[in-house]
Image (cartoon, rainbow, N blue to C red):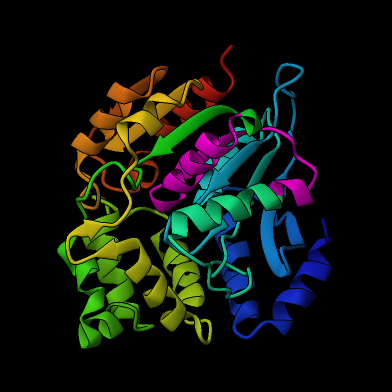
């Protein structure tokens, strides 16, 4: 892991990277966190990640690190409040998926959740982690679930937050990415569009205290040169006119025997709550927690409730 000075130097060498780094540091500071992270080469690409060790009282011996996987939002900084809660007793790692945060703008082959799941395992190999607790949001939840299905020995516990992949349902606007001019509009690096996505789909409480810091981080990532076209092509592989392209089969879900927590915002307008019910019904050792008065990113609407659930589940016997 590189030190802060080295990381900032590398970020400055990336087009748009200095703005992303400064916005990320400001967002982390909202949770009382100094920057801790670095870059590493994975499969020929430069990947950025956050890495925080136990702060005061390490958890029970043998507990692996916690790996946090963001969704199709800006990057690892999305987890700022969860990192602050979990790092009290656990090492916490959050990777910027390819095309997000400060990682290289690299297009992945095939369906994004499958390709990024493979990439995630390569990342863990590169930083020397054999097993972790996996926590994923939305697209990132489908990524960690795919990794858990393909590499069950790499995961101890699994948390799926408002996950993709449990049904076809998806906002109609996301299906319009296949319409040339509408697809271009959706991924245009516009502060107005970014704010409307946040208010309409991501949360039910858009006046959250850290909105300004999050919006600055999100916009800095969104405006990295060359990113918009890659994101649009990635979304085309993720969705079709009919909705999500990839849906986990019943057999795939039944194969997951890990202790699993499924968390869902009661008013999720991206993936319907019945998707979470299906996951909890078919995954043998799963339990479902529906978060009242919360939208798609339920830990932004209800940070205290969701952080308590996360800590209790991941630190449980």
Q: Is residue 73 above or below residue 158?
A: below
Q: What residue is at 23 percent from the left and 33 percent from the top?
A: 292
Q: Is residue 251 left or right of residue 38?
A: left
Q: Can residue 75 be found in the magenta stretch?
A: no
Tell me residue 37's x, y (percent). Answer: 73, 56
Q: What residue is at 28 percent from the left and 34 percent from the top?
A: 276
Q: What residue is at 25 percent from the left and 61 percent from the top?
A: 199
Q: Nearer the viewer, residue 289 or 292?
A: 289
In the rendered structure, which segment of residues is drawn in magenta? 124-152
Q: Is residue 24 left or right of residue 219?
A: right
Tell me residue 2's x, y (percent). Answer: 83, 61
Tell me the quarter of the picture where residue 236 sits. Answer: bottom left
Q: Is residue 141 left or right of residue 238?
A: right
Query: Which quadrant is the C terminus positioned in?
Result: top right
Tell me residue 217's x, y (percent). Answer: 50, 68
Q: Can residue 134 be found in the magenta stretch?
A: yes
Q: Is residue 268 above or below residue 195?
A: above
Q: Is residue 266 visible?
A: no
Q: What residue is at 73 percent from the left and 54 percent from the top?
A: 36
């Amino acid at each position: 892991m590189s030190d802060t000075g080295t990381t900032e130097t590398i970020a400055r060498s990336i087009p748009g990277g200095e703005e992303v780094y400064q916005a990320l540091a400001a967002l982390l500071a909202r949770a009382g966190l100094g920057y801790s992270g670095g870059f590493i080469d994975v499969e020929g690409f430069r990947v950025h990640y956050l890495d925080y060790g136990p702060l005061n009282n390490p958890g029970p011996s043998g507990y692996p690190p916690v790996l946090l996987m963001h969704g199709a939002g800006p990057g690892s900084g999305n987890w700022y409040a969860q990192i602050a809660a979990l790092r009290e007793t656990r090492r916490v790692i959050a990777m910027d998926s390819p095309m997000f945060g400060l990682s290289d703008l690299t297009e992945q082959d095939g369906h994004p959740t499958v390709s990024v799941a493979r990439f995630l395992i390569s990342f863990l190999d590169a930083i020397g982690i054999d097993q972790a607790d996996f926590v994923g949001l939305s697209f990132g939840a489908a990524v960690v679930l795919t990794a858990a299905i393909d590499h069950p020995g790499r995961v101890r516990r699994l948390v799926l937050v408002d996950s993709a992949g449990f049904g076809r349902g998806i906002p109609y606007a996301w299906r319009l990415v296949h319409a040339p001019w509408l697809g271009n509009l959706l991924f245009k690096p516009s502060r107005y569009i970014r704010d409307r996505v946040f208010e309409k789909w991501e949360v039910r409480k858009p006046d959250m205290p850290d909105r300004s810091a999050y919006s600055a981080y999100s916009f800095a990532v969104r405006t990295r040169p060359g990113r918009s076209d890659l994101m649009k092509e990635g979304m085309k592989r993720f969705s079709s006119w009919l909705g999500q392209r990839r849906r986990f089969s019943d057999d795939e879900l039944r194969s997951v025997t890990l202790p699993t927590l499924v968390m869902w915002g009661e008013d999720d307008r991206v993936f319907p709550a019945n998707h979470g019910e299906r996951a909890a019904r078919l995954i043998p050792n799963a339990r479902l927690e529906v978060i009242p008065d919360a939208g798609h990113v339920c830990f932004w609407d209800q940070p205290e409730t969701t952080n308590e659930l996360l800590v209790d589940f991941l630190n449980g016997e």
